[in-house]
Image: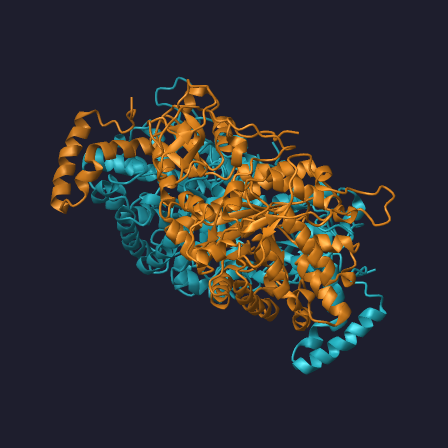
Chain colours: A cyan, B orange
Amino acid sequence: MTIKDARTPASAQNATSGATSGSVNSSSNGEAGKSIGWHKGYVEGSRPDLRVPVRQVHLTNGQSVALYDTSGPYTDPLVETDVRRGLPPLRENWITARGDTEEYAGRPVRPEDDGIKHTSPRGGLRNLDAVFPGRPRQPRRSRDGEAVTQLAYARRGEITPEMEYVAIRENVSPEVVREEIAAGRAVLPANVNHPEIEPMIIGKRFLVKVNANIGNSAVTSSIEEEVEKMAWATRWGADTVMDLSTGRNIHTTREWVLRNSPVPIGTVPLYQALEKVEGRAEELTWEIYKDTVIEQAEQGVDYMTVHAGVRLPFVPLTAGRKTGIVSRGGSIMAAWCLAHHKESFLYENFEELCEILAAYDVTYSLGDGLRPGSIADANDEAQFAELRTLGELNRIARRFHVQTMIEGPGHVPMHKIKENIDLQQEICDEAPFYTLGPLTTDVAPAYDHITSGIGAAMIAWWGTAMLCYVTPKEHLGLPNRDDVKTGVITYKIAAHAADLAKGHPGAQDWDNALSDARFEFRWEDQFNLALDPDTAREFHDETLPAEPAKTAHFCSMCGPKFCSMKISHSITERFGGAAVEGASPEDIAEGMLQKSKEFAAGGNRVYLPIAD
Amino acid sequence: MTIKDARTPASAQNATSGATSGSVNSSSNGEAGKSIGWHKGYVEGSRPDLRVPVRQVHLTNGQSVALYDTSGPYTDPLVETDVRRGLPPLRENWITARGDTEEYAGRPVRPEDDGIKHTSPRGGLRNLDAVFPGRPRQPRRSRDGEAVTQLAYARRGEITPEMEYVAIRENVSPEVVREEIAAGRAVLPANVNHPEIEPMIIGKRFLVKVNANIGNSAVTSSIEEEVEKMAWATRWGADTVMDLSTGRNIHTTREWVLRNSPVPIGTVPLYQALEKVEGRAEELTWEIYKDTVIEQAEQGVDYMTVHAGVRLPFVPLTAGRKTGIVSRGGSIMAAWCLAHHKESFLYENFEELCEILAAYDVTYSLGDGLRPGSIADANDEAQFAELRTLGELNRIARRFHVQTMIEGPGHVPMHKIKENIDLQQEICDEAPFYTLGPLTTDVAPAYDHITSGIGAAMIAWWGTAMLCYVTPKEHLGLPNRDDVKTGVITYKIAAHAADLAKGHPGAQDWDNALSDARFEFRWEDQFNLALDPDTAREFHDETLPAEPAKTAHFCSMCGPKFCSMKISHSITERFGGAAVEGASPEDIAEGMLQKSKEFAAGGNRVYLPIAD
């Protein structure tokens, strides 16, 4: 199996970066004839094995723009990838060099890990070699008593290679990264058993991130599809991927996804635990859950959604709701609490869970199991009671040096969104907020990427650090390849719109480069700088397919006869941008009269060709 | 030619409205067997010829929901439509009964009105009969000195049938409608020569409206396509349509669109005027422009974009911009001002223009010719200098009883959006704001319906009355049928999200009905209530195509084995919504213990079938 449709760079020439600091090395695919397009570049850090990927876009005016790149080695023609061997373990030396972790035999893999019944005559997989044919590996965890999380390192003043890596990616100093992690305002999800990832950071001082969900279900889909969906999502800009599989082969699917993922992988261990008790929530136990968490931590899951805030006394608060509990994890825990009339085993055993997560540097994503599932239920007592509990759990997690983010809603009308982020930041000591949308109306199934993209942009502007995407299939079915792409692109738009509104340093450079290209009719540059170059090019060609139209100084809206951009050019040319600044109204009036005469003398033509 | 794909009601049974006041009459298509689906209903007003259409959705639980309906007679199987004859002139009797207008011979139609050159050997069309084969008509205008605008009527305390009509549509009292129009906070665009429209209102106290642009261009498309695009756009919820044609057959295309449109039609007369001088902006004159305005007013254009705010001294303010002037009308006027070094003829002759518009009750849409075309240019001096001029012009228009709205940007990052609506409301005495997006980033060509849908939702929440849609083809090409639909749906989402955030009375009823259907697994109801039932159904069926899946109590996300909605149902059932409200924590704890025992006694099953 190979990853299909990985973007092949249209260009291969070397170029130096305009927007990213550091020196850029280039991967070349040998087609040195074309200078238009883009290629995979790398910014080198303080050591040769610290190379941060960028998407280097080459413009027809000789400049180049470096864009944040989540697509991993798949878009580097110099790296041969093979999903059976997995990605190169980029961080392995960094992890081993720290000397604070050790390999160990690990928990044996059991048939039921893959949803195969205890009584199944087929037996099952016995070891990881069978699960994944690639490089044999043993799991790794902290040596006795060692604190091996990025939070622990940051607190004691250490700047890890991971921190330097994300500092280069974000164009900030490594010290800012360390400070934000130390303060709990940012997380750097990086399980010691997932050396393949290219480190990234989630926090409100950094670029807004986007998560894409994948996962098979009891109803449909295969392992291959899930691995391909993961690579596909990162190609379009997913910063993390959650594997929410619930059907057969959960363990094996996850292993394949992890070994091939350049981005952090998140899961909801409760889903797999429930499979192990064949869907009977009341049969769940702390032991089964704990065993599942260890199983997944050993595989390398970088962050886990834990619904420990769904407490017994909160369950009745949902009874008067329009749509009750819509979180799958939330409803499982509510059912368990009800069945036993006991406090949640996740809440009761939270400290022990912290110890486990700390040993692998798994990051908490404290789940919002009582999030509203409809406009009517937004910001109600059930939701905020849980949020207060998450604040309490966040403080416990910090005692154990476990990195923590907090999940948020859901369905929320626009005027109630700000309260969510403000309360979360206050209650959870500014821990990163990670929200699903929110969806700003319930009335548009099939367009919930849009209903939620609106809410996502707003809540990210106000401080949410990561957005969980929603695809057009939300509420209706399982997303296919196109849905995944549409979801990711929509959420990249929301995230970038928020980066602009937050005034993130350098965020507007991208918009400026694209708008310059647009104003100067550099069509190819406009396509190559677009979030989705393929679709932009395709849409242009639909109306004006001929090759000359891509260098034409007009578009299909006004046609060649009268184009507003052309008129603007003649204005800019005649008055000059700089000449106007600081001039008095009289100067301008005088200058205009002069220019007007020149304009008339030049034949009064306002739609002269611009650059030729 | 017939309008294709008009939605055929899936149902034909009579039903009474739940959400709209007044008695509802139903059109039946005779298939009386099915009670699920929807049909065209009418709410009757104070007179038999005042019947307000609603989309009456019939739910499987016996209830029905009435939704705002813009689709016109095309979705009523009892009305036979024929685009060659045009729609029935709904308002004709209302207009003639007022006795303040008269028919007159009208301006002769000339070949150049259709872009046919003066020297063309083909000659051209000589009268309206040739232009439009339907019902012969003469244009109508006010009798000497009569003020025939809805603003004039509202100011003198009259509630016109048009006002009553929109009051029923909006679920408010006719007096509120009259007051808002009288104050200039709302407009009711309704040219006396466009009797075919179903009246609608644009103002911040009312539902947020959506405009869809259509129009052929010099490059592509035909008359038939434009008429079909108009009907298609209204079918999905467009409240008004702007015909922005610039190519051949402008006059004839507009005639066909007007005669067949159930919604108000807007234009930019400057586009046609420019065609008459063969694209040479400097050859434009006030006389040519005025003649074009009269030509279009006689045809029945309901509102006209007039770029009278692009004044000579503002032109140099755009020279330092990243993307100069991007408004086509703005650039035409800037070119004219430059060529002659004179103040804009639109600004200079604004009072005379008011007299013309007043005679037909054409509404002004004062254009923002200097709107920003990139994030970099947002909220700059050029933009706000023009806005201040629009405020001045708005006060002049009011003196002439001309209804007026103000156009707004454009490309604006999220943190600069609110300043736009706040300034506009202050400067323009709360005249309705009508904005294009705004687009919140420049980097996503092919997805500008989404970049702008985000900004549109926000600015509408803050007070914008009408949103001009943006399609996925923006910046790239001409929208086709699918693009028009995607643009309208995206903007209906933005508008409804804003209605919710503004707390518009009754807006949430729609969300509640859909969420109830979702929680109760009434799939067919969920589809029929959706903004786009066809796509919602299609997406569901892609994963679970079988007919039984549409009555299944689960979906493809969790599958039949474990569904959060089912758990929630068992919680709601066991605790009861009402029982919890007002109960003390002890009561709840006691109740829970009891319920927990019942739950265990019932077999601890949390995923019992709900309704069967």
Is B417 on the left or on the right of B331, as rendered? left
- Where is residue A271 drawn, in percent x and y? 37, 35
Q: Nearer the viewer, residue B148 or B312?
A: B148
Q: Residue at x 70, y 78 (%)?
A: A588
In the displayed structure, A203 sits above or below B138; it is below
Q: Residue at x 54, y 48 (%)?
A: B190
Numbered marks: total: 0
Q: Quadrant of residue A16?
A: bottom right
In the displayed structure, A344 sits above or below B74; it is below
Is residue B22 visible from the viewing direction of this image?
yes
Q: Quadrant of the N terminus of chain B?
A: top right
- Where is residue A325 drawn, in percent x and y? 31, 39
Q: Quadrant of the C terminus of chain B?
A: top left
Is B559 on the left or on the right of B591, as rendered? right
In the displayed structure, A459 sits above or below B564; it is below
Q: Nearer the viewer, residue A77 or B318?
A: B318
Is residue A87 visible from the viewing direction of this image?
no
Q: Quadrant of residue B65?
A: top left
- Where is residue B408 drawn, in percent x and y? 56, 59
- Where is residue B84 drawn, in percent x and y? 65, 32
Q: Nearer the viewer, residue A120 or B113?
A: B113
